Amino acid sequence: MVGIRKVAIVVSALLTTSFSSQAMMKNYSASIEQSSWSLTKSTPTACILEHNIPRYGLANFSSVANKNINLDFELAMRLKPAQRTEVELRSIAPSWRGSMPSRHITDIAYFKQFNGELEDDKAWMMLGELEKGMHPTFFYQDWYNQRDTVAVAVSAVNFAPQHELFMDCVANLLPYSFEDISFTTLNYKKNSQELDRRSQNKLKMIQDFLKHEPEMELVVIDSYTDSYGGRYNNEMLSQKRAEQMKKVLEEVGIAGNKITVNGYGEKRHIASNQKIQGRDANRRVVITMNRGY
């Protein structure tokens, strides 16, 4: 492991914030025997890589399905910050690398009663230091004794195998997020319960996502028709389309009691029924989903 006590004392002299020569250093890190990394979630919608820091809490990197490659780091502390705290993150070499100097990564702030977080570029930088076998270490003044310094090290021991699996997971994330599908309008072919081609593709996106994230607080399916075919028949058709869509969502794991369906028939047009394009737009089902967390 880092030999954290010896290393941290040397590093403390390099910090931009000066500490009293009388200050004590509280060190939190996993020993070589304790250090482990686990890929706790690996699906096309989310990847989570976790590391336990004894007596302190849990460190994790996460990436979620999105149009953009993304990465977040969270330091989930057993004891949350008692106040806003300035923190420096440094990359520390393990003891077996000799006198290799430490390197400043970034400055961040912990906020009262919140976990520590890094996003995007800073999280990627930290991940890169672990990949090189370094030990990213957070330094800050103790919340309850300003004369003491706290050092929290994230160990690179046993990191490499799980890191490779994590990056494989990230490479296979879906290229869209829940927000991209949580409000979706699908359109039907004329006099049919069959979706047009564009809407079939959008429905497949929804199905692929929900196979892995089916937990919903509420799903509302609102179905509408154009004004051709008779008011009563259109209301029945819209209800049938809504019920059909409910079955599709149940098949990918959404609980039926979480789904509300409404068939509005000819009501609430969004375009003129005098033109083909307007009627095409009015023949629609709108799916609204809320995860609630």
Image (cartoon, rainbow, N blue to C red):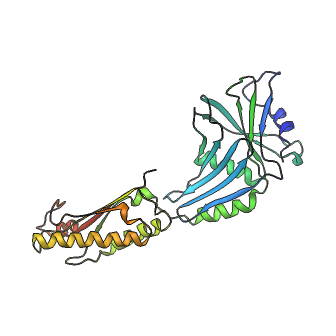
Please name whichever residue, 194 or 216, is drawn nearer the observer in this view of the structure: 216
Residue 145 appears anywhere in the view: yes
Residue at position x 65%, y 36% in the image: 79
Q: In this view, does 226 lie to the left or right of 36?
A: left
Looking at the picture, how far across and down is residue 243, in whole percent?
A: 29, 71
Looking at the picture, how far across and down is residue 238, in whole percent?
A: 21, 69
Looking at the picture, how far across and down is residue 40, in whole percent?
A: 64, 59
Q: Is residue 32 left or right of residue 262?
A: right
Q: In this view, does 139 lie above or below 118?
A: above
Residue 187 appears anywhere in the view: no
Determine the image quadrant of residue 113: top right
Determine the image quadrant of residue 7: top right
Residue at position x 43%, y 69% in the image: 207
Looking at the picture, how far across and down is residue 19, in whole percent?
A: 76, 24
Q: Is residue 108 above or below residue 181?
A: above
Residue at position x 17%, y 61% in the image: 269
